[in-house]
Image: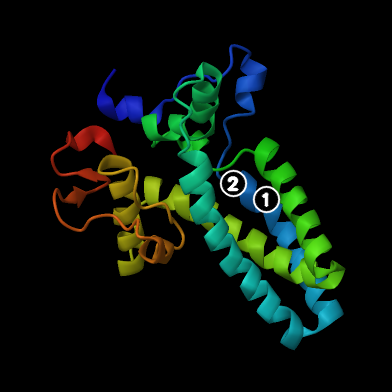
Amino acid sequence: MARSDELKASPPMFESRLLDRFTRVHPSVPPLLFGPIIAVLLVTGLGRMGVLEGLPLAVAGYVFWTLFEYWLHRVVFHFEPFNSPLGMRLHWMIHGVHHDHPNDPLRLVMPPSVSVPLAAALLAGFWGALGYDAALCFGGGFLAGYLVYDMLHYHVHHHTPRTALGHRLRELHMRHHFQDDERGFGISAPYWDRVFGTAPAEQGSRVVSGQTASHDPSRAR
């Protein structure tokens, strides 16, 4: 199999075709699923609290997502329990498959089987910590951050950015994939890598079109 094909086509996670289907998600699913939820949360929350009080909470929820994204990626997605075959299998299913086959378009956004229960649990936690009205605004901002992250992650893998910011975000993420996967954990908010000392090195091999210059040009597109 050509290297470019290998990066695009990941193997099944389960022998059952039905189960494996739930691990492959079209990128249109997150906005179709979470867009209306975010709209309901924000419209209801801002309506109950007022814009002046609710909007800062929504912004805070968005910022909190970016921090959550960084630590989820760094601590959970990149945790490798080498002494446990089951743990290594789970690690591969959660994130390892993405690093082995980073251009598979159906394994770039989070499956609803994971995102929906996780979102429900977090919204319940926000409700308990902030109260109902504040949780609507904060949760709406938080889920908006998640949706931006999921769509941006797909974009940097499968499109050519047309803005300087887009090119920069793509370069940083490709460095994470093809240069040093122990750095560059912030995808939608790479400034957290600066804060926590995990920013990708700017020196060394150059990243071009989604790969280090020393790699085969077919590694990514």
The quadrant holding residue 16 is top right
- Answer above or below: position of 141 versus 72: below
Residue 95 image offset from top left, x and y in percent:
48, 35
Residue identifier under label 2: 28
The kind of residue on which mark 1 rests is: Leu
Separation (CA) of disc 2 from disc 1? 6 Å
Q: Which residue is mark 1?
A: 32
Quadrant housing residue 99: top left
Q: Residue at x 74, y 42 (%)?
A: 117
Specify few, some or many for label 2: CA neighbours under 10 Å numbering under 14, 14-19, or 20 or more. Answer: few
Q: Is residue 208 left or right of residue 169?
A: left
Please, which residue is most extreme toward the front here? 83
Dot 2 lies on which element?
Answer: loop
Left or right? Give the position of 68 relative to 5.
Answer: right
Q: Residue furthest bottom?
A: 52
Coordinates of residue 219 in the picture (x, y in percent):
26, 35
Q: Position of residue 136 (x, y in %)?
A: 79, 67
Marks 2 and 1: CB-CB under 8 Å? yes
Residue at 57 percent of width and 39 percent of height: 26
Quadrant placement of the C terminus? top left
Side of 150 where 183 appears, left or right = left
Residue farthest to the top, as pictured: 15
Q: Amino acid at mark 2?
A: Ser
Secondary structure under tag 1 reads: helix
Instruction: Tell me what residue is drawn at x 43 percent, y 55 percent.
Output: 187
Give the vertical position of 39 relative to 109 (above or below).
Answer: below
Quarter of the image where the N terminus is located: top left
For the question of whether residue 38 can be seen, the reply is yes
Residue 221 visible from this viewpoint: no
